[in-house]
Amino acid sequence: MASVPRGAEVFPRGSIVTFRYRILPHGAYYAAAANRFGMEQAQPLAHVAANVNPALRPLVVLDNERVSVSILKPSADGKEVTLRLRSLSEKPETVQLAFPAGAPQAVHAGGAENLSSVKADDPVSLLPYGVVTLRLEF
């Protein structure tokens, strides 16, 4: 029997594997639009009860469409949120964050080991195709 690389999935002969494709007709390639389309296809719709006001306030809003949120994860105790921003541009980008649902008490930049405090209203700079991780304390 041939060896299978670690982490590879093996499907029994005759099993059915389903693939799903989404096609977006477009002109010139635009990374921000392609990323948005991919995220829209992968994320479930938000739903609310029909008998209440569905006006939802997002946790964070970005002012630069060439930067996207790739992770938004609350801590186990609910007092912190990890926010990861990803640049979709081939040049350095700056993004201003807004917090419609309420500003965090503190914002820390960097990985878990090397955190530095920043102000919630300071712009965030990203390198080309770079990633920045922020920890928001509420």
Image: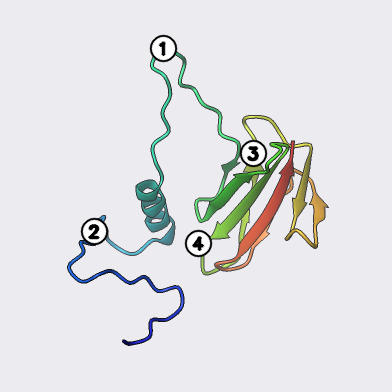
User: Of the residues under marks 2 and 3, which one precedes in the sequence?
Assistant: 2
Find disc 3 in the rendering and name its residue: 98
Crowd band around label 1 with a 10 angstrom C-alpha radius: few (<14), some (14–19), many (20+): few
Q: Earlier in the sequence, mark 4 or mark 2?
A: 2
Which residue in the structure is indicated by mark 2?
A: 18
In three-dimensional space, the C-alpha distance between marks 3 and 4, rounded to whole angstroms, equals: 19 Å
104 left or right of 45 in image: right
SS assignment at label 3: strand
Which tag, 1 or 2, sits closer to the chain's start? Answer: 2
Marks 4/2 in contact by CB < 8 Å: the verdict is no
Kind of residue at disc 2: Thr
> From the viewer's perspective, is the residue at label 2 or at label 3 nearer?
2
The extreme front residue here reads 1
Visual colour scheme: rainbow
Pointers 2 and 3 in contact (C-beta within 8 Å): no
Secondary structure of residue under mark 4: loop
Name the amino acid, label 3. Answer: Ala
Q: Amino acid at mark 1?
A: Asn
- Residue 70 is situated, as x and y percent measured from the top left of the image, at 54, 54
Relative to 111, residue 76 above or below: above
Of all residues, the one furthest to the top in this rendering is: 51
Horizontally, residue 15 falls left or right of residue 81, namely: left
Q: Which residue is disc 4 drawn over?
A: 88
